[in-house]
Amino acid sequence: MTMQFTYVRPGSLQDAVSHLQSENARIHADLCQKPRCWYYRGEFHCLRKGGASCYAVSGENQYHCILGGQDCFIVHPSDTAPALLALDAHLRVAGPGGSRTVDMEDFFVPPAEDVTRETVLEPGEIVTEIVLPQAAAALRSSYRKVRARQSWDFALAGAALAIEQEGGLVTKARVVLSGAAPVPWRAREVEEIITDSPLDAEVVRRAAAAAMAQAVPLGKNGYKVALFQGMLEEELEKMRILCWPPEGVSQSF
Amino acid sequence: MGSVPSVVNLVKGEMMKDDDNDLYFVEGIAVPETPLPGEALPAWRKTAVIGGREPRVDAYERVSGTAVYPSDIVLPNMLYGALLRCPHAHARVKKVDVSAAEKMDGVHAVLTGASLGRQVQWPYTETVVTDLFDAHCRFEGEAVAAVAAATPYAVRDALRAIKVEYEVLPFVADERRALEAGAVRIQAEGNRLKGETYERGDVGKGFAEADVVLEQEYRTACEIHAPMELHGCVANWEGDSLTIWESTQGVYSVQAKAAEILGLPLSRVRVIGHYVGGGFGSKLQPGKYTICAALLARRTGRPVKLFLSREETMLAAGNRPPATMTIKAGVKKDGVLTALQFSGLGSGGAYPAGGTSLLDWLVRDLYTCANVKSELTDVAINAGPARPFRAPGHPQCALALEQMMDSLAEAVGLDPVDIRLKNVPLVSQAREGAPPYTTTGLAECIRRGAEAFGWGEARRRTAAARKDKGHLKRGVGMGSCLWVAGGGRPPATVIVKLFADGSVNLNMGASDIGTGTKTVMSMVLSEELGVRPETIQIEHADTGSTQYATPSGGSKTVPTESPAVRAAAVAVKQQLLKMAAEELGRPQEDLRYTGEYIEVAGNGKKVKITAIAALKRQGVVVGIGYRGPNPEGKAVNPFAAQFCEVEVNIRTGEVRILRFLGAHESGRVMDRLTFDNQVFGGITMGIGLGMTETRILDGNRTGKMVNRNLHDYKLPTALDVPVDMVSLPVDMPDAEANNTGAKGLGEPVTIPTAAAIANAIYDATGVRVQESPADPLTMNRLLAAQGREGRS
Ligand SMILES: Cc1cc2nc3c(=O)[nH]c(=O)nc-3n(C[C@H](O)[C@H](O)[C@H](O)COP(=O)(O)OP(=O)(O)OC[C@H]3O[C@@H](n4cnc5c(N)ncnc54)[C@H](O)[C@@H]3O)c2cc1C
Ligand code: SF4
């Protein structure tokens, strides 16, 4: 018997979610993939593998993190995890000791907490469900990914945006970066700046700059600062257009 | 007749008329006149088959999976071989303990430096010769031991069980640091392996005469060979005779080196390589793997299959060396070049391996310039040895020279097309005596390419859009080139047999490395003999049963082999005409070979080829063809110009290539399909150099290659290559070059690609990309340096 697969390229996070509602739909959530760091995957006994030090910090770190690094400087490889975090998902986790619910926010373990683990899963535990809240009608969402080649590549920089607007102002925003940090990274500075504001050019510029305010580039990944800033500007501007026309503006033209 | 060919019909899935003449001959085909024996072959005039679109004669085998590549070979009792490789960039082997490995289940033989000693030597070059397992490992991936075991798993387990004690040595990973004081010495005589200088005219005078002088620095990253089929072979002994099935571009070069190293007569080494899944220069020679397979097979008395893993090929099966270049150029206001000065530093790894091979050739020879000076320095670093990589040196040099040409054009207010047209040479200035080119299509490629691309209109459009505030910027760019070789040369010997039923067999030693050699040669036979290309049986790439041939490389296979094939076909025709002349009692001059028949001029009398009594009696006519010499005092080179359009997102540094056009002059277009395949493939590979590929060594701490897998080493994917690609052949049969008028194409197709992209990026953004690859890492850095406001 041959299996038939249909791959879809969703236009937004909600679009992706709606595809998942069809029968037999599957998503590779990529919540638990081990780090892509080439030292970690290669013949290097680095800190995360129980070795004495991180090879990346002073080595070939062009694909490593600019935010949230401490001792270890991986980026979280997933495209879906930031999207799920932006949609405020939580996870059902089951193991020998029973099952529990974990907020996406708390699922990933940054190196500052424990450099040898990536998630809060205990030995024997697996993720059994991803639960998404009902989306508000005003929600607009997107996922953008910049990579070194157009297919078969992880994000150099990515962003998942879930934004609600009303009357030309942002009422609710979740912005999560991929390719930036060891875990899917809430860009809270961006969320704060755009909330209760219009997504005008000035706000967009300020928000994108704020996202990178705390960035600490390593020797070879300084390019990511400009890249994230540019990408966030572009994505936030698109959001403004996605939410057009703002409430109260006549659609009759 | 009928039953055997009908099987052929079934396989090919086509119907043929039940007329035996139609089985092998094309009805009504106009074959060229047959010269009398001893007369020179005139150039083809109008061709019936050549220049058409002939699908690969082995297309069915290749796509159906029935083609047997060397890596598909499985022999009875076969063992699997593998090499243990040094995991350090630079180390000395102190001790190798194989005791545990030898005791493992399924392990049949373990070879080490201690067990082999000085018995087997590996010639890295003619003069640099080491033990096969040299204790001094100068690069990560150097061979330390070899194992043969019953299964691929057992052999890898055994490798893991071998304990090696290394003294880890300091390393140099970057050619720019190889000559620093205090850099570790990799070769006994130091890290400077070779210096080369070239000078003509007086560059000082040339710069003084110039209205504009510019100087720029460039660096291209190291590219790794990544052919689809891995490197390796199957080796088998029968008595004292060795047979090797190797994935190779040249069976005779594998035979020569294997025989030399193993101390065997050439006659006892048979190398077979009917199919090869890509080579690109990395399979012109055998590797240590070939020798190890032969030794393991000898030791165990069983066939041994030894193919590398992808990771191993990335370390030890060759690369395009990184190049650091400086170029200085002077130009007059009218666009005439007055001086070119170039210096290049490169490294082919830990051994002399052509680290700066041909790196300055385009500077020396592409454009008319009286005053040229260049200096090349090849240094050793602790990395895998280079192997020739499609057009060695040229694409790197093009990135520098072609961007310089655009910079000069801008400085004097000329269009990039016009400045190049101002400097088109008719002679090869860099060769002794400045011989004229037999033909040069450089100007035609530039002119016709620009026209077909819509260059003038596109330049006006991108210039007008520069004022726009948007962050998506369009740009167009071009690059032109020649390729230093591509004329082909002797020797080549080809045998064509025409059997009593009219069916034909072609026997040649050359490999078809995927470029369509077999197809093109079938077309030559079809053109001359009037036979159907798909019915020709081809024997090739086997030192035991086919004729001597040089390896398929240097874009020389078509211009080397096709004239010999044509000569062999003509020899067949001449013999048939002689037979017919005797039977018909007419002088040979009165007869004409027309394919199915030999006709008597004037009176309409004719005899079927298959009805010639002497042919029936003899069973076969054997024609032998040799490649004649190249024209004296002339240079034979192919030329090209490529054009592209890009879109750059100046916020994210993403570059999208929107379209490409390759205008190529390679003499006569033999098969339009294989021609276009080369152009598209070459552009794709050039996009790899320009946009995605770079070997990354852990320069600070270990010197090890960190991206040695197909995910982290980024070959372009289908999405990185534009759908809109156009091949524009500039068909200029070169009657002086050889009797088919063809020049080579396989390498020029990848030379100007990265340069054209870089020029397009400049047109879009005002940023000069003086390094490869132009990925978002590089682009964001350069755009940030330029300032977020865009071009000044
Ligand atoms: C060549 C290549 C390119 C890729 N590119 C991208 C990319 O660009 N972006 C991206 O996001 N991903 C990328 N991926 C990763 C891909 O998305 C993941 O491999 C996939 O999502 C994993 O899903 P799977 O079902 O195949 O998991 P598996 O391969 O089965 O598992 C992956 C990991 O998760 C663990 N795991 C699996 N299921 C559970 C569970 N229920 N609970 C707890 N742990 C679990 C496994 O133990 C394992 O460690 C790429 C993968 C490959 C091979
Ligand atoms: S970044 Fe983390 S995984 Fe990579 S080398 Fe450093 S410690 Fe190891």
Image (cartoon, rainbow, N blue to C red):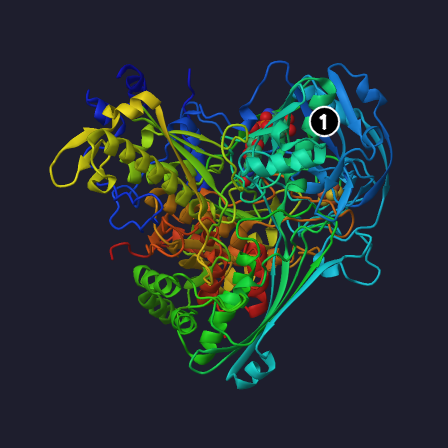
> Which element carries disc 1, helix, strand or loop?
helix
- Residue B228 locus on image (x, y percent): 53, 36
**Left or right: residue B777 compared with residue A125:** left
Badge 1, how many Cα within 10 Å: few under 14, some, many 20+? Answer: many
Label 1 belongs to which residue? Answer: B295
- Residue B309 locus on image (x, y percent): 64, 32
Residue drawn at (12%, 36%) of the image: B604
The amino acid type found where label 1 is placed reads Leu
Instruction: Tell which subunit mark 1 falls on.
Output: B
Residue B336 sits in which quadrant? bottom left
- Residue B396 locus on image (x, y percent): 56, 58
Of the four image quadrants, the one with ligand 2 is: top right
Q: Can you see residue B566?
A: yes
Q: Residue furthest left?
A: B603
* Tally of marks: 1
Q: Can you see residue B14?
A: no
- Residue A175 locus on image (x, y percent): 55, 48
Disc 1 Cβ-to-ligand 1 distance below 8 Å: no
> In front here: A233 or B789?
B789
**Left or right: residue B526 compared with residue B289:** left
Please identify the quadrant where the C terminus of chain A is shown.
bottom left
* Location of residue A69 with respect to B339 vertically, above or below: above
Please identify the quadrant where the N terminus of chain A is shown.
top left
Residue B201 sits in which quadrant? bottom right
Residue B50 sits in which quadrant? top left
Residue drawn at (84%, 60%) of the image: B182
> In front here: B772 or B667?
B667
